[in-house]
Image (spheres, rainbow, N blue to C red):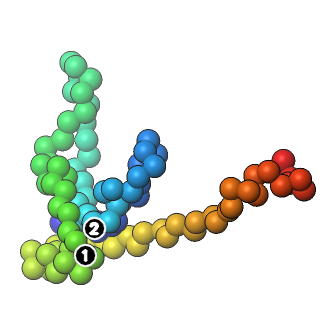
Amino acid sequence: MDARIYQPAKTAMQSGRGNTRKWVLEMEPATAKRIDPLMGWTSSADTDQQVVLRFDSKEAAIAFARRKGLTYEIFEPHLRAPKIQAYADRFRWDRVR
């Protein structure tokens, strides 16, 4: 059974980064999803992919995966590069538009 350990990115719908500080451990899908022919719903017999565990640190998530005997892959987060700009720079006379 494989697991993914990562730190989630912020959502595109809001500017806050509320749920991005914790590390997430979630299981890889063991079986492919299938479409119900009558209703068209997507379903799967694999209930492990519904489990999402949150940890305060990457080390805690790794320790849990090792304790349970899971193989895991760690995805490091992409760090933000803040663009520092003064408000007055918007009104400079030599600003490129």
Image-quadrant location for residue 65: bottom left
Give percent across and percent down for residue 4.
Answer: 28, 66
Give percent across and percent down for residue 32.
Answer: 26, 46
Q: Is residue 41 above or below residue 34?
A: above
Residue 57's mark?
1
Q: Is residue 6 above or below residue 64?
A: above
- Residue nearest the viewer, comparing 73 with 23: 23
Residue 6's mark?
none
| Residue plotted at (19% across, 52% down) | 49
Task: State the separation of the CA atoms marked 1 and 2.
Answer: 6 Å
Callout 1: 10 Å neighbours few (<14), some, many (20+)? Answer: few
Secondary structure under badge 2?
strand
Question: Would you name the residue on which mark 2 appears?
Answer: 23
Image-quadrant location for residue 67: bottom left
| Residue plotted at (21% across, 18% down) | 38
Which residue occupies the extreme front position in the image?
88
Residue 69 visible to an observer of this rendering = no
Amino acid carrying mark 1 in the image: Ser
- Residue nearest the viewer, comparing 9 with 83: 83
Q: Is residue 6 above or below residue 19?
A: below
| Residue plotted at (17% across, 49% down) | 50
Amino acid carrying mark 2 in the image: Trp
- Residue nearest the viewer, comparing 52 with 27: 52
